């Protein structure tokens, strides 16, 4: 069977949830037994988002194959439950780089190289080649940005051309505001967005409407008339108690059967086992039996998308533990001065210190880690959170005054964290860190790490340039810090733990492999420890 395509376009504004919509469609197709994969287009001229500030574009999501991709790939993997590859990410930078390279090599035989047909043909060839290699039943293509943007106009044109030779279903995601003054769902902005799409030569098969409340029949009728569609093709996408309910919501509206019909696919029975498991995990997320309070400490908390995977890993782990995780977002730079208010941390049942780059906020992180250790609060350090866990221990337990990372103090007296040898001769920033899936050996069966994973050999994703300095391993171990995980060649430290209580740091980013229903093991263990801590606090009140 030739690969079929679903193309998702957003109008009016960014942030409507095209990624979640794409992931929901992937999940629905999977529940019906069809193989489906995403393709994401981003119009920026960066080769990838690896060098982009989290404040501008949210977190950088890293795949097993070391690709640094858009955070929507995290949503895809969490819904689809499988690992993806970097060739599914198409950016303006990659496309223009390829075109210029071919032109310099004389491959256009003297032609004037233009957006149409050369760039649009390149896009179509890329997609067709990926389809030949991976052979999915359906590709779900998310077009980044909004209809009307210059950045994605050539890609939208390529999708129109793709539909001339392939089976393509177009979906327009739009927004219907409700004005408090009149209490009416307004369709005029959606009509304007649709008109722009029609001018591009694309008439959508479905219009998905983001709303704060249920989509009214009168609103459906108005939009259907304007779009020349049946009313049943105007689909409600109202706010959900959890984003993981969206595939179930779409199935309840009948959108699933219409979509399969448009794709020319047989409407098989839903996989009852998979569907039941998904529903049960949604129930545990929406209506858990208990709750825990988690302090999430970072350097970029003003834009919470910077820690999207960490947040979702907490949600997944909380669901498995049948609790709701109340997250307090803690900006680490607020804890760099004396006399800081630690009340938010004191209320927390567990603390997570996340990754990041640069000196800002790191001393605040160290102060928070010390608070967790001295007050026996369950602690998880991720990447930088592991490195600073080692620095804090060196300073305050081993008594190594002046201990630091050379990332922040190149002349530090005690260089606990140092640049990887493999990084010392690197000059380019993009795609040059220690990236992707890396194997690790867990050393102690009694460790938190081993108990969490249940095995001695694991693989987690990485994104870092600095690493624990092995020269200090013996000194810190004598003072009670445990090294519980190392690389297969025993050269790099991957896990460290406190000798008492629940305190663990990992150089990896286990949040990147967390899935709904299959949480990252360290997060599941942390939430279990937080649950015990919460009960203990209640008993002591």
Image (cartoon, rainbow, N blue to C red):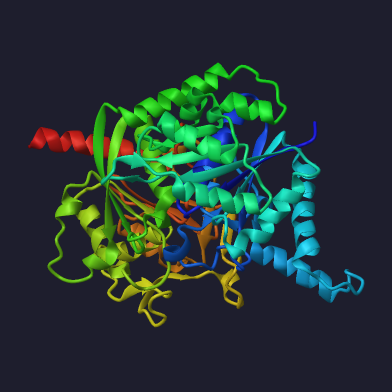
Residue 142: x and y, percent? 60, 48
The residue that appears at 48% across and 36% down in the rendered structure is 222
Q: Taking the image as drawn, is residue 147 in sight?
A: yes
State which quarter of the image contains the N terminus.
Answer: top right
Q: Quadrant of residue 117?
A: bottom right
The residue at the far left in this view is 541
Image: 336 above or below 154: below
The residue that appears at 78% across and 69% down in the rendered structure is 114
Residue 278: x and y, percent? 47, 26
The residue that appears at 63% across and 49% down in the rendered structure is 198
Residue closer to the observer: 104 or 456: 104
Say how many tags the image has: 0
Residue closer to the observer: 311 or 523: 311
State which quarter of the image contains the C terminus.
Answer: top left
Residue 385: x and y, percent? 37, 59
The residue at the far bottom in this view is 411
Side of 519 where 155 appears, left or right = right
Image: 468 above or below 278: below
Q: Quadrant of residue 384?
A: bottom left
The residue that appears at 38% across and 32% down in the rendered structure is 214
Residue closer to the observer: 479 or 161: 161
Image: 284 above or below 102: above
Q: Quadrant of residue 444?
A: top left
Residue closer to the observer: 272 or 172: 172
Q: Taking the image as drawn, is residue 510 in sight?
A: no
Side of 216 where 503 appears, left or right = left
Side of 162 where 76 appears, left or right = left
């Amino acid at each position: 069977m030739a690969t079929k395509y679903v193309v998702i376009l957003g109008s009016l504004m960014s942030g409507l949830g095209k990624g979640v919509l794409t992931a929901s469609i992937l999940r629905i197709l999977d529940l019906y037994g069809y193989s489906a994969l995403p393709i994401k287009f981003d119009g920026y001229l960066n080769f990838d988002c690896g060098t982009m500030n989290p404040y501008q574009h949210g977190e950088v999501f890293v795949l097993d194959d070391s690709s640094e991709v858009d955070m929507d790939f995290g949503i895809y993997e969490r819904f689809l439950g499988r690992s993806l590859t970097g060739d599914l990410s198409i950016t303006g930078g990659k496309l223009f780089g390829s075109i210029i390279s071919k032109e310099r090599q004389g491959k256009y035989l003297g032609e004037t190289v233009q957006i149409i047909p050369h760039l649009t043909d390149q896009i179509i060839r890329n997609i067709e080649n990926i389809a030949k290699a991976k052979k999915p039943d359906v590709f779900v293509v998310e077009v980044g940005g909004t209809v009307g943007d210059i950045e994605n106009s050539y890609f939208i044109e390529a999708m129109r051309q793709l539909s001339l030779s392939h089976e393509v279903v177009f979906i327009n995601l739009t927004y219907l505001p409700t004005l408090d003054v009149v209490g009416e769902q307004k369709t005029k902005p959606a009509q304007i967005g649709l008109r722009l799409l029609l001018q591009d030569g694309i008439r959508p098969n479905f219009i998905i409407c983001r709303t704060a409340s249920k989509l009214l029949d009168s609103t459906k009728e108005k939009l259907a008339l304007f779009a020349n569609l049946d009313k049943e093709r105007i689909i409600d996408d109202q706010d959900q108690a959890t984003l993981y309910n969206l595939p179930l919501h779409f199935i309840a509206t009948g959108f699933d059967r219409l979509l399969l019909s448009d794709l020319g696919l047989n409407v098989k029975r839903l996989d009852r086992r998979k569907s039941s498991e998904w529903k049960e995990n949604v129930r545990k997320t929406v209506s858990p039996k208990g709750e825990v309070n988690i302090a999430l400490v970072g350097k970029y908390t003003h834009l919470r998308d910077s820690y999207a995977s960490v947040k979702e890993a907490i949600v997944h782990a909380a669901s498995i533990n049948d609790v709701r995780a109340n997250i307090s977002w803690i900006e680490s730079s607020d804890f760099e001065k004396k006399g800081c208010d630690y009340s938010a941390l004191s209320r927390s049942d567990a603390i997570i210190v996340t990754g990041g780059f640069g000196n800002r906020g790191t001393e605040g992180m160290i102060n928070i880690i010390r608070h967790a250790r001295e007050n026996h609060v369950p602690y998880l350090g991720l990447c930088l959170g592991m490195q600073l866990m080692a620095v804090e221990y060196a300073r305050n337990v081993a008594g190594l005054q002046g201990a630091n990372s050379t990332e922040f103090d190149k002349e530090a007296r005690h260089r606990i964290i140092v640049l990887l040898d493999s990084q010392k001769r690197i000059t380019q920033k993009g795609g040059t860190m220690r990236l992707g899936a890396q194997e690790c050996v867990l050393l102690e069966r009694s460790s938190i790490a081993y108990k969490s994973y249940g095995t001695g050999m694991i693989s987690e994703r990485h994104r870092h340039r600095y690493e624990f300095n092995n020269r200090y391993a013996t000194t810190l171990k004598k003072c009670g810090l445990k090294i519980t995980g190392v690389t297969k060649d025993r050269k790099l430290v991957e896990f460290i733990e406190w000798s008492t209580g629940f305190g663990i740091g990992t150089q990896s980013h286990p949040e990147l492999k967390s899935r709904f229903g299959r949480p990252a093991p360290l997060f599941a263990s942390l939430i279990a420890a937080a649950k015990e801590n919460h009960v203990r606090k209640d008993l002591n009140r």
